[in-house]
Image: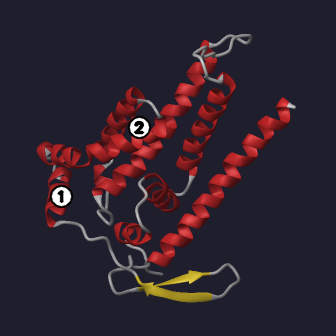
Amino acid sequence: MGQAAHPSQGDSLTVSDGSGNHRVEAPVKKPVIPVEELELVAAAKAGDRRAFEELVRSTQAGVYTLACRLTADPDDARDVAQDAYLRAYRSLQRFRGEARFSTWMYRITANCAASHLARRSKSRHEELGEDEAMVDDRPGVDPESMAEAASLRDRMVVALADLPPSLRAVVVLRDVYDLPHSTIASELGISEAAAKVRLHRARRKLRETVLPMAGEENAHAV
């Protein structure tokens, strides 16, 4: 059996509603990728380091902003961004060019942020003794609330990285970058309806992963 072709502009997308019924959505539109970007990606794949450096320059602001939002720390964000571009360079041959290079970088950055926060959390636990606690004694700062917020953020980033790439990309573009559904659909080469379906599934999976963990912690504290 042959492989299904990647939907191209003008193709329609069939979506299941979960009850066995299927409906045909609006035509799928592939993301519009500038010719200059396609040429840079092709050159970078062929070993042109200057082409890859140009791709880095064109996306570094967005990548660093995303890393900052996910780590809430400028120094960590710089480490995450550097790691993301290193991974991208090593994986460049696997980039098929079906989405914008920036979209691909956002996915890699989300993964790198999750790994970084996991290492940071482990390091903190190793540095603290069993009877020690991280305390911020600044006036008006509630150490317990700060610790809870940091823990929630770390769990959220790890849960985000655990999502399937198709769901992760949608939730990052919508909830982190606040892009409209139409733009997300264009970036990912799917219909707007499919983008909304993926976003709903992604948010549900994140709630199922993160909120039960928070509930368990509260139960243990009682």
Q: Which is more foreground, mark 2 or mark 1?
A: 2
Q: Residue at x 64, y 57 (%)?
A: 205
Asked whether, in this view, residue 31 is left or right of residue 221, the answer is: left
Q: Residue at x 32, y 66 (%)?
A: 98
Find residue 155 and report its image quarter. top right
Q: Nearer the viewer, residue 166 or 42?
A: 166
Q: Which residue is mark 1?
A: 42
How far across and how far down the image is residue 204, in percent?
Answer: 65, 60
Residue sticking out furthest to the right: 222
How far across and how far down the image is residue 184, in percent?
Answer: 40, 66
Q: Earlier in the sequence, mark 2 or mark 1?
A: 1
Q: Residue at x 52, y 32 (%)?
A: 117
State the scheme by which the image is colored. secondary structure
The crowd level at tag 1 (other Cα within 10 Å; few <14, some 14-19, many 20+) is some
Residue sticking out furthest to the front: 140
Residue type (three-letter) at the residue carrying disc 2: Cys
The correct choice, above or below, for 67 with respect to 30 in the image is above
How far across and how far down the image is residue 188, in percent?
Answer: 38, 67
Q: Nearer the viewer, residue 21 or 74?
A: 74
Q: Does dot 1 land on a helix, a strand or a loop? A: helix
Residue type (three-letter) at the residue carrying disc 1: Ala
The crowd level at tag 2 (other Cα within 10 Å; few <14, some 14-19, many 20+) is some
